[in-house]
Image (tube, rainbow, N blue to C red):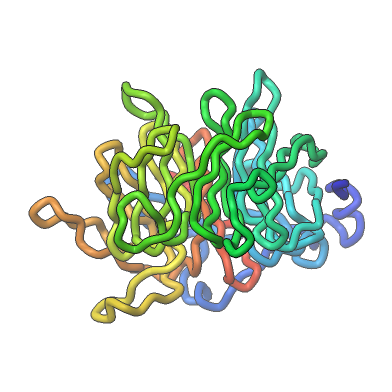
Amino acid sequence: MNTRRSFIKKASAIGLGASVTSCSFNINKAIPLNEDIIGHGDYQYRVQRDWAQLHSTTTPVINCHEMVMDSHKRLYLLTDHPDNNIIILDKSGKLLDSWTLGYRGAHGLTLHDEGGTEYLYITDTSSGSVVKTTLDGDIVMSIDPKAEGFYSDCQSYSPTETAIGPNGDIYIADGYGSQFITQFDAQGRGIRKFGGGSFLQPDKFKQVHGVAIDYRGSGEPTLLCTARIKNAFKRFTLDGKYIEEIYVPGAFVSRPVIHRDMLYSDVCFGMLPHRPLITSEQGFVTIIDTDGRVVSNPGGTAPTYIDGHLQTLYQEQPIFKHCHDVCVDDDENLYVLQWNANSVYPYKLHRV
């Protein structure tokens, strides 16, 4: 059962004038608000840190994990605060509504249109839950790969993301568990699993953090999966056969987000120059074209290719900490969500 709280009730509790401040963290205090433009080439953005008209006393968050936009241009923000799993905003950052399932590990959020009706798919790393809900938060289906016999008793399972195929098949990424992708039909019946954890084998993962259906190109759609610890995305057919890897050196990428012809992803951890085995909270956004070439890194270094090989990427401007997801709206503005960043609300990057 979800718990709903309306914008009107929240606003009246503290007064509208006090409800439009947002959280921030110290790393950004030296950078003037909204004056810095980041990114490269045709993909440059002006940063707005105070976009979300929210207040921590009435709409608290812990980590802002993922965001999607529905057909009415409403933005659904997923957080792991048990009082605010879903926060709904408009593109100006105004709070429209919120509800919760009480999840303390709410992590993955996917929106899917099924014959004109939109649903959300939510993963909870803490309980292992994968649920399909209405936009109002009513659960209509639960999926459990362990109950389908995909896992032995000694194999860990902690789902991080879902993707929905063109025929309604559901793909679950076990990014914090045993690193499998499990596939189900639209009714939640198990079909297969593939992947698993390995540093060396190309068709396996280290932290299969995200998954998405890639409809770009003239061929059949494919499944694009994050291999975060490998600094890569892995491409598979929809029946689990490995195709290729997109290597992004230095970028510990989050889930793949496909918008029009481009692939967007947040970088949760970055490398430190001259310290190749050390990572830190050096987050940024990376944008990749249909040829697998990085074209822009908002907050990061410009992409450089030498003899066809992408050079290691680093954070260049300390605007973000651990970037966890990016949402692209219909005007190609970006919304950047952060994990372990002192409960900061999403930033909006305005395309320039």
Is the residue 213 above or below the residue 232 in the image?
A: above
Residue drawn 46% across and 60% down? 207
Is the residue 192 above or below the residue 149 in the image?
A: above
Q: Tell me: 198 left or right of 51.
A: left
- In this view, the residue in front, 130 or 182, is 182
Residue drawn 53% across and 75% down? 29
- In this view, the residue in front, 74 or 291, is 291
Residue 149 locus on image (x, y percent): 63, 47
Q: Tell me: 216 left or right of 51.
A: left
Q: Residue furthest left?
A: 307
Dividing the image into 4 quarters, which one contains the C terminus? Answer: top left
Q: Residue furthest top?
A: 115
Please tell me how many numbered marks the rendered image carries: 0
- In this view, the residue in front, 132 or 89, is 132
Is the residue 164 above or below the residue 172 in the image?
A: above
Residue 124 locus on image (x, y percent): 68, 55
Is the residue 135 above or below the residue 106 in the image?
A: above
Q: Is residue 333 visible?
A: no
Residue drawn 91% across and 59% down? 13
Residue drawn 69% across and 33% down? 119
Q: Is residue 22 visible?
A: yes
Residue 309 locus on image (x, y percent): 16, 55
- In this view, the residue in front, 189 or 47, is 189
Q: Tell me: 229 left or right of 67.
A: left
Residue 253 locus on image (x, y percent): 41, 58
